Image (cartoon, grey):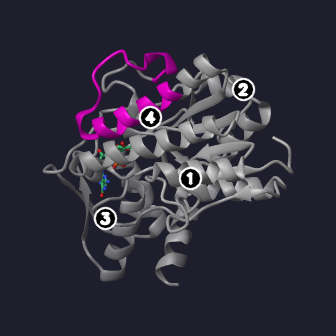
Amino acid sequence: MAQQEKIFVAGHRGMVGSAIVRRLQQGGYAHILTQTRQELDLLDQRAVQQYIAQEKPDYLFIAAAKVGGIQANNVFRADFLYQNLVIETNLIHAAHLAGVQRLMFLGSSCIYPKLAPQPLKETCLLTGELEPTNEPYAIAKIAGIKLCEAYNHQYGRQYISVMPTNLYGPNDNYDLQTSHVLPALIRKAHEAKVRGDDTLVVWGSGTPMREFLYADDLADACVHLMEQGYDGPLVNIGTGSDVSIRELAETVKEVVGFQGTLSFDASKPDGTPRKLMDVSRLHALGWQARTGLKAGIERAYSDFLMRTHA
Ligand code: GFB
């Protein structure tokens, strides 16, 4: 990627897209294209084709998606399947029609089978049944990977797919019904501290294991792969280590300064028991995560405070 080339970041208002834009700006990239939802509706095939044909970006990052935590995935199943399929097919096909040669598609660790051997290797894709709570989202993301592979195979494109682990960081979603666990716990711990509550309610049993990557680390990994001109098979992006939800809640408590106890709500789903990424392919490509979990939660908490007190 050269600094004067045109780079379109789809989904720049979200946590991942905004981190990619920050990282590109830091890297001196001067020609970054972005579009708000009002300017370009990614569900509108004709509008997407017109925009990409007109701008002809040299590179495209697909960070636009309908995302959410375990509850949102489980409840809004049609929205997650439909919107993600349409956004990715519109963007990938429009990029191909306009002659865009390089594209990065971002997926998720939930594409791997629920009970796949840990840590999850890229080669375990499609070797078993998916976790039911996020099957629609996972199916859409698997279709995106396969679409990239098919355009590469049939038309010689260089459309790469990366699979980030669970993410958190600036511009996260703090809505308790639709968010992921980490922003939810930050908000719950903060509000419990302010109200002087005795307990903080954690969904599920607290035993599932999850790996957490800071959004700016993810963006750095994505730009690293594009700068290298990587055009091989899909790559996991993670830290290589995980914690239980109980341990995560303890760390959030400590960072936020909530002194009460944890209670566990068994009526809420646990989801997949563990999804630790095998990051050996990524390490071999010369990239490793930098932000430790506690330091990342401290930064995310500052971001939460800034947003809620703005
Ligand atoms: O982050 P999360 O919503 O998504 O939940 P997944 C992770 C674990 O944290 C689950 C527990 O076991 C939850 O039950 N948890 C505890 C909580 N307290 C809370 C809380 O207050 N809010 C939330 N949200 N969870 C998603 C997938 O799965 O991960 C998506 O549904 C996507 O498709 C994303 O892949 C990265 O890790 O279970």
Q: Name the residue under label 3.
A: 176
Q: What stretch is highlighted in magenta?
A: 119-147
Q: Which residue lies furthest to the left in this view?
A: 267
Q: Distance between the residues labelled 4 and 3?
A: 22 Å
Mark closer to the chain start, 1 or 2: 1
Foreground label between 1 and 3: 1
Q: Can you tell me whether the CB of the residue at mark 4 lies under 8 Å from the nearest atom of ligand 1?
A: yes
Residue type pointed to by label 4: Ser
Report the side of 69 relative to 125 (left or right).
left
Q: Distance between the residues labelled 1 and 2?
A: 21 Å
Closer-to-camera residue (108/205):
108
**Which of the image's four quarters has the N terminus?**
top right
Q: Can you tell me whether the CB of the residue at mark 3 lies under 8 Å from the nearest atom of ligand 1?
A: yes
For the point 36% across and 81% down, the residue is 194
Percent of width and height locating residue 155: 63, 21
Q: Name the residue under label 1.
A: 16
For the point 32% across and 42% down, the residue is 81
Q: Secondary structure under badge 2?
A: loop
Neighbour tally class for label 3: few under 14, some 14-19, many 20 plus, Cα within 10 Å: some
Mark closer to the chain start, 2 or 4: 4
Q: Distance between the residues labelled 1 and 3?
A: 19 Å
Q: Which label sits on residue 109?
A: 4
For the point 53% across and 61% down, the residue is 40
Answer yes or no: is residue 203 visible.
Answer: yes
Residue type pointed to by label 1: Val
Q: Which label sits on residue 285?
A: 2
Report the side of 94 relative to 24 (left or right).
left
